[in-house]
C-alpha cells in the first residue's frame, strides 16, 4: 500500500487517535530508555510518523530536545502543529523525503511497519545516515516476515516487516551498534530496537 493511501486512512481517524493516545503511556518507557543512550550535548530529535504529537513530543521537549517531525497524514500534522507550536512539523513520506539535518535521536514508533516492504531497507539506511556521532535510532517492527493487512477502525491497514534478523543485520551494515532490543507486547508480534552511531 502506498504511503499516501495510509495517510488518507489516518486522516479519517486523526481525532480518535489523538483522543486515545495523547495522554497514553504507550511507548514512553522504551523512548525514555533510548534517551538514556543519547549524548548529553546536542539534543536534536526527529519523530518519523509523528502523528498528532502528544505524549512523545512532550517527553522529548521535556528532556531538552528541539523536535522536528513528519507524517503522511495531513490531518494529524495539523493537530500536531496546533498542540506543539515550538516544533517543526511537515507532511511528508518517509520513502521520498530528503532529510537535510542530522539528529541525536531519531524515533520511528509504529510507522516503518506501514511502509511497502521493499522500502524498509532504504528508509532505515537513510535514517541511520542522519545520526550524529553517539546518536540513537529507535524504531518498532513486527517480528514476523512479510506483508499483511488488518482491520482497524472499520478500515483496512497494511503492515510489513523484514523480521528481527534482517533488521539487525541492516543496522550493523549501516555502521550502528545495537544497544537494546525487546519484544515488548507479547503475545503480539511487536519489537522495539535501539541502535547507536558510535565514534
Image (cartoon, helix red, strand yellow):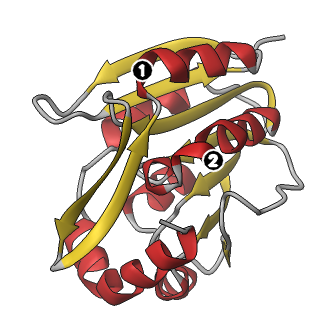
Provide residue 189's location: percent of width, then percent of height.
23, 33
Is residue 55 shown above or below 156? above
Disc 1 vs disc 2: which is toward the camera?
2
Q: Is residue 63 visible?
A: no
Q: Is residue 142 visible?
A: yes
Where, by quadrant of the figure, is residue 2 drawn? Answer: bottom right
Residue at 42%, 20% (x, y): give it. Answer: 164
168 lies left or right of 152: right
Is residue 45 shown above or below 98? above
Q: Which residue is mark 1?
A: 164
Pick the residue in front: 54 or 154. Answer: 154
Pick the residue in front: 110 or 122. Answer: 122
Q: For the residue carrying disc 2, how many other residues have a C-alpha within 10 Å: few (<14), some (14-19), or many (20+)?
A: some
Pick the residue in front: 8 or 181. Answer: 8
Task: Name which of mark 1 and mark 2 comes first in the sequence.
Answer: 2
Element type at marker 1? helix
Provide residue 79's location: percent of width, then percent of height.
47, 85
Q: Which residue is mark 2?
A: 119
Q: CA distance from mark 1 to mark 2?
A: 16 Å
Where, by quadrant of the figure, is residue 122 drawn? Answer: top right
Amino acid at each position: 500500500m502506498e504511503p499516501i493511501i495510509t495517510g488518507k486512512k489516518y486522516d479519517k481517524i486523526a481525532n480518535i487517535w489523538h483522543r486515545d493516545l495523547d495522554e497514553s503511556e504507550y511507548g514512553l518507557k522504551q523512548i525514555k530508555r533510548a534517551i538514556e543512550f543519547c549524548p548529553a550535548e546536542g539534543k536534536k530529535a526527529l519523530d518519523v510518523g509523528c502523528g498528532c504529537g502528544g505524549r512523545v513530543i512532550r517527553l522529548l521537549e521535556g528532556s531538552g530536545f528541539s523536535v522536528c517531525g513528519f507524517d503522511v497524514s495531513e490531518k494529524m500534522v495539523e493537530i500536531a502543529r496546533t498542540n506543539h507550536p515550538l516544533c517543526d512539523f511537515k507532511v511528508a513520506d518517509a520513502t521520498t523525503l530528503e532529510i537535510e539535518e542530522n539528529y541525536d535521536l531519531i524515533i520511528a514508533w509504529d510507522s516503518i511497519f506501514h511502509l511497502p516492504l521493499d522500502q524498509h531497507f532504504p528508509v532505515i539506511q537513510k535514517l541511520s545516515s542522519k545520526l550524529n556521532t553517539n546518536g540513537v535510532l529507535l524504531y518498532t517492527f513486527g517480528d514476523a516476515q512479510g506483508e499483511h493487512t488488518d482491520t482497524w477502525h472499520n478500515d483496512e491497514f497494511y503492515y510489513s516487516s523484514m523480521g528481527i534478523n534482517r533488521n539487525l543485520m541492516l543496522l550493523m551494515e549501516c555502521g550502528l551498534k545495537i544497544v537494546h532490543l525487546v519484544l515488548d507486547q507479547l503475545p503480539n508480534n511487536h519489537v522495539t530496537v535501539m541502535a547507536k552511531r558510535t565514534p
